Amino acid sequence: MNRFTRAIARGLTLCCLLSAGAAYAQVPDKFTNLKHFRKDISKDELMTQMRGFALGLGVRCGHCHAGPPNAQLADMDFASDEKQAKKTARIMLKMMNQINGKYLSRLGKEKEDLVTVKCVTCHHAQSRPLLLQEILATSLDEEGIEGMLAQYQELRNDYYGGFTYDFGERVLLEFGSGIAEEGKLDAALAILELNAQWYPESFSNEYGMGGVQELRGDKNEALAHYRKALELGQGRQKSFAQKMIDELSRE
C-alpha cells in the first residue's frame, strides 16, 4: 500500500468514524418509494449500500437525492424521483444484478470462483466512467495540444496513486499511436514526448516517436529515436529498431 493509498484509507476511516453517527441520525427510520431494494430492508443495510454507491462513484448523497444545494441529509427528499441520476442508478443496479445473477452463472464456474460486479468495478470513483485516453481525446478536440497536455497533468496531479485512471506507460503510448493514425501527428508527438518524461527508458515509446517523426518527414529525428530505441531494446526489439535504422539510412 503506497503513501497515497494509506492516506486515503486513513481519511475514509476517520470520516466514517466522525460522521457515521450524525449521518445515521439524519436519515429517516422508514423508507418509502423503494423500487430496487426490498421493502423491509433495515436502515443499517440501506445505509451500507448507499455508502458503497457513494464511494464507488466518488459522489455525495445529493448526486442522486433531491434537496437544496449543499443540503444536509435531514433536508433531503429521499423519496423523490426528481433527479435523473436516481432513475439512472436504478437502471444501472438492474443491469448489475443481471450480470451477477444471470450472466455470470453461464460461465460454467463454481460460485466461489466468480467475481461479483459492483459499482466500483467499472466506475472507479467516477460518476461518468471515462478512460484517461477518452478524456484526453476530448481535450485535444476542444482545447488543442496545450489543453490536452494540461488536462493530463491536472489528472495526474489529482489522481496518481489511486485507482481511477491508469497512468501506466502503455496508455499514452497507445493513445499517441491512435491519434497518429488519424493524422494528428503533432499531437501524437507531444503526447509521446510527455510519456517519455515519466518513462525515459521505454523502448516502445522511443520506437513510437521514431515512427511519428518518420510520418512527419523528419528523417534525422526519426533516426535519433530509433537509435535510442536500439540502445534500450532487448532481444527482438533491437532487431526491429535496427531494421528501421537501416531502411531510413538507405533513403
Image (cartoon, rainbow, N blue to C red):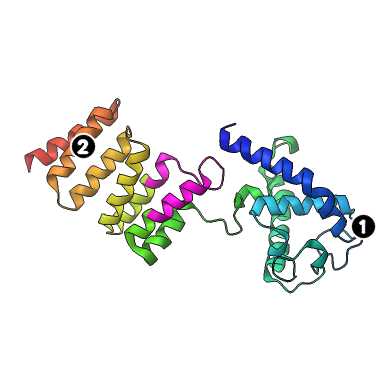
Say which mark, if any, is on residue 226: 2
Q: For mark 1, give the secondary structure.
A: loop
Magenta residues span 150-172
Q: Nearer the viewer, residue 175 or 104?
A: 175
Rendered location of residue 197, percent (x, y):
34, 40
| Comes first in the chain, label 2 or label 1 | 1
Crowd class of label 1 (few under 14; some 14 to 19; many from 20; radius 10 Å): few
Amino acid type, mark 1: Asp
Classed neighbour count for the residue bearing mark 2: other residues with Cα under 10 Å, few (<14), some (14–19), many (≥20): many
- Main SS of the magenta part reads helix
Residue appearing at x 57%, y 43% in the figure: 163
Quick check: is 159 in the magenta stretch?
yes
Q: Which residue is mark 1?
A: 40
- Say left or right for 54 vs 210: right
The answer to whether residue 136 is magenta is no
Mark 2 vs mark 1, CA separation in Å: 66 Å
Residue lying at the far left of the rendered structure: 251
Q: Which mark is residue 27?
A: none
154 vs 163, nearest the viewer:
154
Q: Position of residue 52 (x, y in %)?
A: 73, 50
Give the quarter of the image for residue 82: bottom right
Which residue: 92% across, 62% down? 30
Q: Residue furthest top?
A: 235
Query: Eyeballing the image, is 13 above or below 1?
Result: below
Mark 2 falls on what kind of element?
helix
**Which one is nearer the viewer's eye here, 35 or 101?**
35
Q: Does any portion of residue 108 appear in the rendered image?
A: no
**What residue is drawn where x is 73% and y is 60%?**
61
Does residue 117 appear in this view? yes
Q: Amino acid at mark 2?
A: Tyr
